[in-house]
Every structure is written in C-alpha cells, then in structure tokens.
Image (spheres, coloured by chain):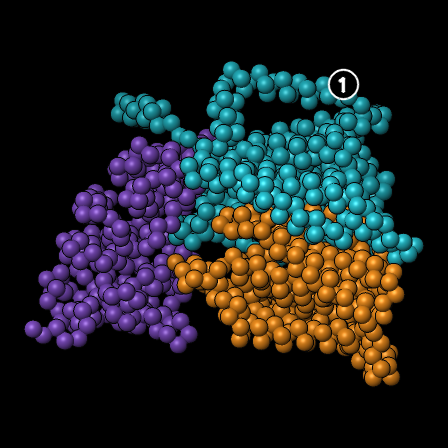
Chain colours: A orange, B cyan, C purple
C-alpha cells in the first residue's frame, strides 16, 4: 500500500510539472495553431536562471525561503521575457506563412536556445541547491510525499485556479478566448491581437518557469537538455487532454505523470519514456482531438 | 534617423537585460564558483545594436518583395541562366562530374569520407523531399527508417554474415514495409498532428533500439560491420573510395528517379494532395494510396541509405538516430526549397559541407544551424531554389498529332 | 430519357440538426437541372452527400452505369464516386494553386489512367503514351474552354473568371456523366455569366454531360434549366419547370418570407 501511495504521489508530482509546461503549449496552440517547440527551452532557461539567481543571492547569505521566492520570481521574469522575445522574432513574422515554415522556425529556435545555454554556461549536469523550504506537517509522510513534492502540487493547483479565474473573468482573458476562436473577427472588434498573443506567450512561459524552478529543486540537478524531453512529454500531455483546452492540458498531464509513475514502478523503468510516446501515438491515431478536445471539421 | 537609432538602442538594452544572467553570470555549483563575464554583456549590447538595423532593413525588403509579387531572383537565375541555358548547363555539369570522379585522387581520405557523408544526406534529402516537398506530409521522424535500414544490415551482417549487397535490397524493402506500417494508421491526420506522431514514432524507434539490448545490442551499438565487398581485394583507403563512388552512383540514380516521379501521374497526384486534399479526392485521386506511396518511397530510400551508412562507418548505435537527425534532414528539404530537386541537393551540400570546412566555428555549429533555420524561414521561406512545375510545349504536340492523323487516315 | 442519377429519401443529420431531410431526386441523360433555395437550405450538404464527402445518415444514392445497372454510392469515398462518373466543382474555388493550369486539368485524368510509382520509374512505351494522351486530352479541354493560352501559367495567377472555368475544365477531364456545379456564377459579371450559360449548354450538347447546378443567380437559373428543384430547411419544397417554380407560392415564401400581399 505504501508503495502504491509513493508511486501515486510521485505521479501526481510529475504530472503537475508536466501540467505547468503543457499549459503553455496548449494556450499557444489554441491561439495561433503553432506547436511552440522552443517552449521546453523556456522551461530549461527558467531553471537555469533560478540557479544563477540563487547562486548570486547565496553570496549575500539570504535565508532559504527568501532565496526561493526571489529566485523563482527572477526565473519567471526572465522566462516570460524570453517567451515574449521569441514570439516577436521567430513567430510573428511567420503568422501568415504556411504551417510548416513556422514549425521549422520553432524547431530552429529550440536548437538555438539549447546551444545558447550550452555554450554560455556548461554541458555539465549542474547540481541545483535545495531551496524549497521544509514543510513541517509533511514530515511524517516524507516517504510518500516530500516537502518539495508537496510544494509542487500546491503551486500547480494555485496556478491552475489563478489561470482559470484570469481566463474566465478578466478582459484580457476574454480577449484571449475570442482571439483563439476567430483571430480576424477579434481584430475587427478592436482587440489588439498582437498584445493578446504576446500575453499568451508570457503567461505560458511564466508557468513553465515556475515548473522549471520547482522540478530543479525537487530533482536536484539541471542540464541544458532537460527542456527537450520535458517539452515532448508536456506536449504529449497537452495533446492527450485535447490541444487548445486548458483543463485538458492539466488532465492529460496528470494521466501522463501517473502512467509513467505506475509503469516504472510495476513494469519496468527502462521503457518509461517509450510509454509516453506510445500513449501519444495511440491517442493521436484514435482520438486526435484528445480527451477534452473539440473535433473541428473542415468546411467544404 | 534618430528614431532608428533609438529603436536599435532600445533593442540593444533589451537584449543586454535578457541575456544578462546566462551570458554574464556563470554559476558553477559543483565547485561553488561564480564568474562574471562583463565582456559578453558589451558584446551582446554592441552586436544587437547593429544587428537590429540589419534586421529591420531585411524585414522591410522582404515585405516590399511580397507586395510587388516578387520575382525570386536566385531561382530565376538558376532556371533561366543555368538549367535552361544548354551552353552553360552541360559543361558545368560535366565539370562537376569530373571533379567528383577525381575527388579521391585530389584530396585526402578524410575529405572523401566527409564528401561521402554529404552525398548520403543528398539522397536522404531527396527521399524526404518526396514525402514533405511533393506530397506535403510533415514527417518529423524520418530518421526511424534510416535506423531500420542501418540496423537491418548491421544485424544481418553481425549475426548471419550476410554481405552488404544482399542486405541492401532487404534494407530497402524493410524500410518500405516500415513506411507502410507506420503510414497506414497515421496518414489521415492533419499537418501538425502528423508531424507530432511521426516525431513520436522516431523517438519510439530510438528508445527501443536503446533498450532492447538482447536484439539490438543497446546503447553500445554494433561494431565491426563489414564494408561492402567490391569483388577485388581492397585496402581500407580503397574501400572508402569505393563506397564513395557507390554513393555517388546512388545519388545519380536518386536524382533520376525523383525527377521522373516529379512529372508523372503520381507526382502530380502528390502535389495536388499537398495543395488541396479535398479537391484532390473529388477529382478521383485515392488519398490513402497516394499518401502511402509517398511515405513508402521516402522510407525505402532512407532504408537504403541506412545500410550504406552502416557499411561506411562500420559501427552504429542508437545515438546516430536522434530527433536532431530528422530535423537536419527536414532542414535540408525546407532550406533547399520544398519540392525542388536542385534546391535540396544544394541544401544538403551546404548544410553538411559548410560546417566541416568552417572547422574554426565548430563549437557554434549547432547554434548557427538553429539560428539559420529561423532566419531562413523569416527572410526566405521558399528556400534556396524554388521548385518549378513542368512546362508543356504544345506546338510540338500538335505536330505529332497531325502526323498521327495522317498515318491513321492513310492506313 | 435514360436516368443517370437516382436519389431516394436522402437524409443527413449532424448531431441533432437535420440538414437534408428525405430528399428524392433524379437526373436523366442530357438534362440541365438546377437546385435552388435560400442560404442554409442544405444544398451544398446535399452535394457533399452525393459526391461522397459526407456519409448520409439515411437514404440511397444510385448512379446508373453505362451498362444500365445501378450502383449504390452511399458511403463510397469521393474518389470512387468520381470514378463512377460524377464530378463536381466547389463553391469556394479549390484549384491546385501552385500547379500549372494544364496540370490542374491533368489531375482530372488521374482516375482514367493507371500509371503507378513503378511504371513512372521504368517508363515504358505504354506509360509514355498514356502521359502524352493525358496532356493532349487536357489541352483540348482547355482549348474548348478558352484557356489554352494559359496552359503553362500557375493556376493562382489566373483572373477569377478564368479560375472558375478552370475548375469546370478539371472536372470535365474526369469524363463524368453528371457534372455537379456549386454556384458556378458566383462573383461573375453579366458578360461572364452569359458566357457561362453558353459553356454549360455546350457541355451538355457536345460533351454529353448532364448538369446539376446550385445557383443563386435567378436570371441564369431560369434561362438555363429544364427542371428546378427547390430546397428549404433541408426539405424539398417544390420541383418543376422554371415557369412553374416562378409562380410557386411556397418558393416565393421561402425566399421572401411570409406575407407578400399588396
């Protein structure tokens, strides 16, 4: 029973991280129908920026909680900036171009960012200091769910709630939904579509950065390549839940996290990544619109 | 003028801010050190200041071209002054063929292996060009078929001592089978989804190769694969040269075949499918069969090249078949010009040979590669040389027809 | 008159919405028939069902082959339907934009030719002959439609009226028995519309093709059709000669709304 609970919470924790990243994918796809290949790199840059910030702050002997908060905020600030810049440089000029061009540009950006961090920093696996505070009431359950794991789940839930409220009730949120449904019409109604798209990227990047910091602290190390595999998995989750659907991204992410966790625990850990891809392929073949997605027919 | 300077200054400040943590601060948590590299900050500031002028200039130029319904100067030059101009075309082609034939005697063995690699990528590019360029099927997992071919020969050779010449057709057939098996469930998906599924397949193949150690020898790969036996005893250098000539021959065959396909019934069906799937079906084209044939053709060729690759390097492991490989081959097709055979050839040669000859920048290879992909798409999305559809000459045809009518009535 | 297409009780539901409601329809050899009705009446949906784009929820679609036997078209894929002699054009022009004009028409020859990858690579005499015949057949169609001069031009560069004619030429290349035209006069000026009328008559008289057209241009419909079927809200509300339809109160009500007294 304990083993099951361990796997369960491990799965939920993983799923939460995937969810934070998947939201960025699904929101961007929903609004400009682009698979933002570089999104995984935004997540990675968030982790790296947090590491750098924490490193600098530790010189000044700040308390751990303060370092955590500041480093996270810095990471979010920078990842959002990168997301914003990437959109302006690599995607905006291609908004009316055929899909393949934008896709290639995204892949190119992804490769560029990976190597940018690699060259500017290092190819080593850098240990990430544990900057998440210890949570007292979790301590007795430590073997099932660690403090950092709990924080991950908690932050993800809070982020979900805030995002849903934002999308549903604020003007910008409504503008985002409108633009996602019909860009031209939104433009004609006076919505600043460029700003809405930039906002989408910024929010998605902020969430990814949060995920980056949390998982880096949880696992304890980072590397320039973590964006790629996390990105693919998060994208799988987004597609699984129905690309373009925000609750879908979360649902898909949780399912993916749990599937990975239980298959590792009960079957084998070697093929862990394969399960994610197989799940992706199967979902796309049998229900491309995903679990919560809407089917869009082509008008003849 | 001043507003332009202001714009560039703002861009420069933005990039200095943006790259500050990663470019300037180097935190090493292993050794607990922090290095501050202020020189980088200056470099970013100055560089982005000037580059932003260039960027805006090129953007304006691109937009102006679009508005004028631009004539693509490079492509026009290529088709009219080069291919169309018989007096120039044949001598140049002859010259190129001579250079390629005498290449091993003019350059070192190392250069020969590099050229062989480039030629392998030319074939791969042409193969993927049929899938992506002609038929418009976004395949991000092309490397899977390449891997199938390579492992086919490697395993057959390692386990059963099967020679290269026997394994080559088998590699092609297995590639085709893989293409049909993968293609069948997947080809009804729309653009982006197809791309992701094929990417997933590519990764699945790689992961299976890595983890199914009993069959594929896992991450350590398969070594000591035989080079092809060309009938007479060859030294290693001779063998390498022989493989070079063989690949070159293959390139010629591939160019010949894809050229034939381009203006055939199936070639037109592929392009029609790419242009408008619904109209294509309404005009009597079997969507599924047509897509599958493109996919299978590309896969077959990748299979062939996989076997050649295994024979050339005599050692393969799953690390040679990553998503990056698929991305590189895709870039060759897109950057060269989707659907354009000369474009893809040029693209492959540039993309593979340039990094080799500019060894000084080898560290920045991938960075430049990624950056070029973005830049090409933003500033020159049609690629190096645009594809050109066949022009039919009907004066000749009506002459033939009249001849036939005369023959028909006289008999 | 030999029947070519026979449709019984055709029904198409999209979830809870019934777009086509028990439509009976027939078209015979050498006829020009029009299908009219207000926007949203279900006309294009009807076309889509007949040509295989949609699988009808109910009813039967039969085509009569040259040997007088019937073939049920329900649920067949669009390319199969075209093989059986039914071709169509589209409301929003769907040309193969990056291909030349001639190649667009040559696609129409696809279902009447046989070359595959292997024969394309090997290219024996038979295949060369087939290619040549395809090209020249297509060229002749273009000449008949007045597009011969444009044969090597990229399709998207053609003026609008020429593009519409190209779509018809392409459909004609499939050697259809019945040609379904979806709003062929949309966007055409009066001169072009008059040319189109001549063209359609020519197709029927010289090429032996029966025509079924959806159209909103009432002048053209009245001039060209022998029979008109009227749809509204998915149902057939009237059928008859142009004179009968012109006077039919149901039709007037459907187009102009209730209460046209005074």
User: B392 above or below B219?
Assistant: above
Whole-percent x and y of residue A26? 59, 64
**Rendered-image quadrant of the C terminus of chain B:** top left
Whole-percent x and y of residue A287? 57, 67
Q: Is residue A167 left or right of residue B398?
A: right
Q: Closest to the observer: B144 or A176? A: A176
**Rendered-image quadrant of the N terminus of chain B:** top right
Q: Closest to the observer: A67 or B119? A: A67
Q: Closest to the observer: A258 or B165? A: A258
User: C142 above or below A44?
Assistant: above
Residue at position x 57%, y 31% in the image: B342
Write down the quadrant of residue C203 in the picture.
top left
Residue that lies at the very extreme toward the left in this rendered image: C262
Q: Is residue C117 visible?
A: no
Q: Is residue C231 visible?
A: yes
Indicate the secondary structure of the residue bearing disc 1: helix
Q: Is residue B83 left or right of residue A89?
A: left
Residue at position x 83%, y 49% in the image: B36
Whole-percent x and y of residue B245? 71, 26
Q: Dot 1, crowdedness within 10 Å: few (<14), some or many (≥20)?
A: few
Residue at position x 28%, y 67% in the image: C41
Whole-percent x and y of residue A32? 53, 58
Chain bearing mark 1 = B
Residue that lies at the very extreme toward the front in this rendered image: B2
Write down the quadrant of residue C202 in the picture.
top left
Query: Where does label 1 land, which residue?
Result: B106
Residue at position x 10%, y 62% in the image: C243
Q: Is residue A187 left or right of residue C151?
A: right
């Amino acid at each position: 029973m304990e083993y099951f609970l361990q796997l369960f919470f491990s799965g939920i924790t993983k799923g939460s991280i995937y969810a934070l990243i998947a939201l960025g994918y699904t929101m961007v796809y929903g609004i400009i129908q682009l698979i933002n290949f570089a999104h995984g790199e935004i997540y990675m840059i968030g982790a790296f920026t947090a590491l750098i910030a924490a490193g600098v702050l530790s010189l000044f002997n700040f308390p751990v909680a303060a370092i955590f908060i500041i480093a996270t905020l810095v990471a979010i600030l920078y990842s959002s900036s990168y997301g914003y810049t990437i959109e302006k440089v690599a995607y905006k000029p291609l908004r009316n171009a055929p899909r393949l061009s934008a896709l290639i540009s995204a892949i190119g950006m992804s490769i560029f960012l990976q190597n940018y961090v690699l060259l500017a920093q290092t190819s080593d696996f850098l240990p990430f200091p544990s900057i998440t505070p210890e949570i007292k009431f979790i301590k007795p359950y430590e073997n099932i769910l660690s403090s950092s794991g709990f924080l991950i789940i908690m932050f993800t839930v809070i982020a979900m709630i805030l995002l849903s409220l934002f999308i549903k009730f604020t003007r910008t949120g409504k503008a985002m939904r409108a633009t996602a449904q019909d860009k031209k019409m939104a433009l004609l109604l006076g919505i600043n579509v460029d700003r809405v798209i930039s906002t989408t990227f910024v929010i998605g990047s902020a969430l990814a950065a949060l995920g980056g910091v949390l998982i880096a602290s949880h696992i304890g190390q980072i590397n320039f390549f973590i964006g790629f595999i996390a990105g693919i998995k998060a994208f799988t989750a987004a597609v699984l839940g129905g690309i373009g659907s925000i609750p879908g991204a979360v649902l898909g992410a949780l399912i993916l996290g749990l599937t990975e966790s239980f298959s590792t625990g009960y079957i084998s850990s070697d093929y862990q990544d394969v399960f994610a891809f197989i799940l992706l392929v199967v979902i796309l073949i049998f229900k491309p619109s995903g679990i919560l997605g809407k089917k869009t027919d082509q008008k003849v | 003028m001043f507003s332009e300077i202001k714009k560039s200054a703002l861009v420069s400040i933005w990039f200095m801010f943006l790259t500050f943590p990663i470019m300037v601060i180097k935190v090493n948590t292993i050794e607990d050190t922090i290095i501050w590299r202020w020189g980088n900050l200056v470099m970013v500031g100055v560089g982005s200041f000037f580059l932003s002028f260039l960027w805006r200039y090129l953007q304006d130029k691109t937009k102006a071209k679009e508005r004028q319904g631009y004539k693509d100067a490079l492509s026009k030059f290529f088709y009219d002054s080069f291919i169309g101009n018989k007096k120039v075309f044949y001598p140049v082609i002859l010259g190129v063929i001579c250079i390629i034939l005498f290449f091993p005697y003019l350059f070192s063995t190392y250069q020969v292996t590099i050229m062989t690699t480039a030629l392998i990528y030319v074939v791969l590019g042409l193969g993927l060009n049929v899938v992506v360029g002609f038929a418009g099927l976004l395949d991000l997992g092309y490397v899977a078929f390449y891997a199938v071919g390579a492992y086919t020969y490697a395993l057959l050779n390692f386990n059963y001592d099967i020679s290269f010449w026997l394994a080559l057709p088998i590699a092609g057939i297995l590639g085709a089978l893989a293409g049909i098996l993968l293609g069948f469930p997947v080809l009804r998906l729309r653009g982006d989804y197809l791309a992701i599924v094929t990417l997933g397949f590519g990764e699945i193949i790689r992961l299976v190769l890595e983890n199914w150690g009993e069959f594929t020898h896992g991450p350590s790969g398969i070594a000591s694969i035989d080079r092809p036996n060309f009938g007479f005893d060859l030294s290693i250098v001779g063998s390498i040269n022989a493989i070079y000539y063989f690949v070159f021959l293959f390139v010629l065959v591939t160019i010949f075949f894809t050229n034939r396909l381009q203006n055939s019934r199936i070639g037109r069906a592929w392009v029609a499918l790419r242009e408008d799937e619904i109209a294509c079906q309404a005009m009597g084209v079997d969507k599924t069969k047509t897509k599958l044939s493109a996919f299978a053709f590309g896969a077959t060729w990748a299979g062939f090249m996989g076997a050649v690759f295994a024979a050339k390097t005599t050692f393969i492991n799953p690390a040679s078949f990553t998503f990056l490989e698929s991305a590189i081959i895709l870039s060759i097709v897109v950057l060269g010009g989707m659907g354009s055979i000369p474009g893809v050839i040029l693209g492959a040669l540039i993309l593979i040979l340039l990094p080799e000859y500019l060894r000084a920048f080898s560290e920045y290879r991938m960075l430049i590669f990624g950056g070029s992909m973005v830049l090409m798409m933003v500033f020159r999305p049609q690629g190096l040389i645009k594809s050109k559809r066949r022009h039919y000459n009907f004066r000749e045809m009506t002459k033939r027809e009249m001849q036939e009518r005369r023959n028909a009535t006289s008999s | 008159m030999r029947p070519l297409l026979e449709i019984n009780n055709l029904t198409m539901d999209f979830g809870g919405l019934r777009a086509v409601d028990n439509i009976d329809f027939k078209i015979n050899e050498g006829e020009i028939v029009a299908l009219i009705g207000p926007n949203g009446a279900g006309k294009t949906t009807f076309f889509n069902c007949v040509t295989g784009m949609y699988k009808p929820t109910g009813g039967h679609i039969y085509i009569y082959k040259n040997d007088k036997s019937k073939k049920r078209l329900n649920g067949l894929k669009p390319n199969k339907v075209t093989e059986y002699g039914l071709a169509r054009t589209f409301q929003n022009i769907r040309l193969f934009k990056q291909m030349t004009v001639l190649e667009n028409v040559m696609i129409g020859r696809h279902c009447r030719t046989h070359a595959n990858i292997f024969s394309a690579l090997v290219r024996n005499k038979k295949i060369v002959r087939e290619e040549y015949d395809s090209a020249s057949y297509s060229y002749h169609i273009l000449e008949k439609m007045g597009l011969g001069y444009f044969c090597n031009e990229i399709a998207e560069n053609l003026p609008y009226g020429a593009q519409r004619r190209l779509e018809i030429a392409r459909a004609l290349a499939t050697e259809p028995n019945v040609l379904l035209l979806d709003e062929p006069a949309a966007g055409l000026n009066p001169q072009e519309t008059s040319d189109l009328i001549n063209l359609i008559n020519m197709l029927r008289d010289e090429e032996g093709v029966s025509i079924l057209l959806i159209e909103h241009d009432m002048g053209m419909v009245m001039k060209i059709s022998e029979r008109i079927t009227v749809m509204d809200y998915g149902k057939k509300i009237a059928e008859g000669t142009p004179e009968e339809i012109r006077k039919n109160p149901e039709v007037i009500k459907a187009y102009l709304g209730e209460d046209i007294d005074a």
